[in-house]
Amino acid sequence: MKLLSPRSRTTASTTASTRSDGAPAPAVLEIFPTYVRLGDGYAATFAICGFPAEVGPAWLVPLLSYPGRVTVTVHTRPVPAQLAAPMLTKQRARLESTRRIDADRGKLSDPIVDAAATDAADLSERVARGAAKLHDAAFYVTVHGRALDELHETAAGVRSAAASMLLDLQPATFRHHLGYTSTLPLGVDALGMRRIFDTEALAAAFPFASGDLAAPAPGQYVSAEAVLYGVNTSSHGVVMWNRWAQDNHNSVVLARSGAGKSYFVKLDVLRSLYQQVEVSVIDPEDEYTPLANHVGGTVIQLGQQGVRLNPLDVPTDTGPTTFRDHQLTLHTIIKVMLGAVPPPAEREALDRAMTATYEAAGITHDPHTWGRPAPLMRDLAATLKADPDPAAQQMAARLAPWVSGSFKDLFDGPTSTRPEGHLVVWSLRHLPDELRTIGTMLALNHIWGRIDQPAGDTPGTRRRRLVVVDEAWLLMRDGEGARFLFRMSKAARKRAAGLTVVTQDAADVLGTDLGLAVVSNAATQVLMRQATQAIDAVTDAFGLTGGEARLLLSAGRGEGLLVAGRSRVPFRSQASGDEHLLAATGIGGEL
């Protein structure tokens, strides 16, 4: 390839071709003194010729993460031990000779030469002891641009970033085509602008010290079940996380209102569906309905006309303790309805009435009777009224609003919609505030029935299930509801299920023992923007550093911190165009 003059150019190929690896090559390669044109784009290559005396971990990250199309390539090969020692001896002799000549001539010593001589002596000693090895390495940076102005602007920015790290970038003048080849994934160093590095400095060049998740050990099997959480805001790496590979499958998302937590959770739900995970969502604000409609899920809008849930429905499982466990759960549901634990006499009357109500419907502890129509709440209230015990009469009066009063619509009849499908959304938007806590409780009870005794699943092929409780503070503010959520978080792992708790009231959740227990039982913890009033509680609960606390106070919408064991990874939610349309619906803004 011949260059005629500084203003001339050479066309290497004027027609489209194909490289040996099958990928299409640029239609045109034009070589200029200061850049090359590749098809409809431009590229320029720089070699790193000057380095600082000392470098820190991941010192190449500012170039790797530069906001532009920049390729950084490192070519390295080890220097044989039999050549390394003589090479260092010659270098030390050259530097010492320079120092002595300057001294003999009465010149002041050059600090650069003094530092180089000291470093060479130290390196020579470490190589002799086998504590370090030498490598012949070359560092090249190729900058791309769609136009010459963009190329020059990006190149100026890269050189400025390099200068701030005391790196000297020199253009590969008249050899940019060789530089471009050297930065392709071919392993060919066509420029040959190398220098000697020791192992420690060379290893620090790689971005292993960035805030990314730890890579798996060599030879360890990596599952393909990880879900994309977003992009690392400190290293621009991709954050992939597999909740099913952790000690438990639960997660907690804490953020103030408007921080983008629902956006992040909807992306997590959608990408979990890609992995054939069955998902159930408690949706207080009807935000997940467009997503469910898009993927063919089921939406149960509690509070709408004709939509009912019968708390007395008997599970379909035929286990020996199923009926007893169901009665205990029914006690918990009624405690949540009443908003308090009834006195012992009323609890005894309620338990007696439950047994009598089921027997009147022909349902006993015999599993063969469980297929019969279940009694209703009004049947239970009628049994309590018929009991002459004053405690039973008192309990019947306390249940009156839920049976014949203003709260009866949700319970006034058999269950109208069966929650079935790969995505089931329980919408609470149409429920009044007084019914949202019990609506959440009833939905979780139905969901837990499917998880505890999944129909059609065998022990070896149990399908993974994910339960998302958005705005979990609705249930956490009730003592019995918080205890049910805690028991669910403890027992979910053994049933191949995961619980995701999403709330904006971080201080209230972390201020109770049950709230802390639910958070502690989540191996995956996602913290997004926090309110100033809650940051102290969040910092204490999660052991955050001062920098992490400041990050959460200033995080933008969709940005957060993934906390999983010792891993602390800042990230930003990332979605494709189609995913964004589904996830942004109902959040009142763009990310």
Image (cartoon, grey):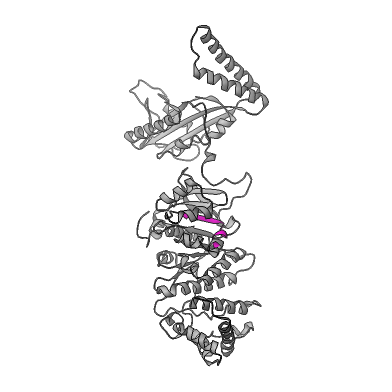
Q: Is residue 15 magenta?
A: no
Q: x%, y% of residue 441?
A: 50, 72
Q: x%, y% of residue 279?
A: 50, 65
The residue range painted magenta reads 518-527
Residue 452 lies left or right of residue 570; in this view the side is right
Against 529, residue 369 (above or below) is below
Q: Is residue 521 magenta?
A: yes
Q: x%, y% of residue 304?
A: 39, 76
- The answer to which quarter of the image holds residue 463 is bottom right
Viewer-nearest residue: 512 or 553? 512
Q: Give the total number of marks visible in the rendering.
A: 0
- Residue 277: tell me if it is visible: no
Viewer-nearest residue: 152 or 502? 502
Against 413, residue 286 (above or below) is above
Viewer-nearest residue: 39 or 409? 409
Q: x%, y% of residue 345?
A: 58, 84
Q: Which image quarter holds the N terminus? A: top left
Residue at screen point 43% across, 56% down:
533
Toward the right, the furthest residue is 129
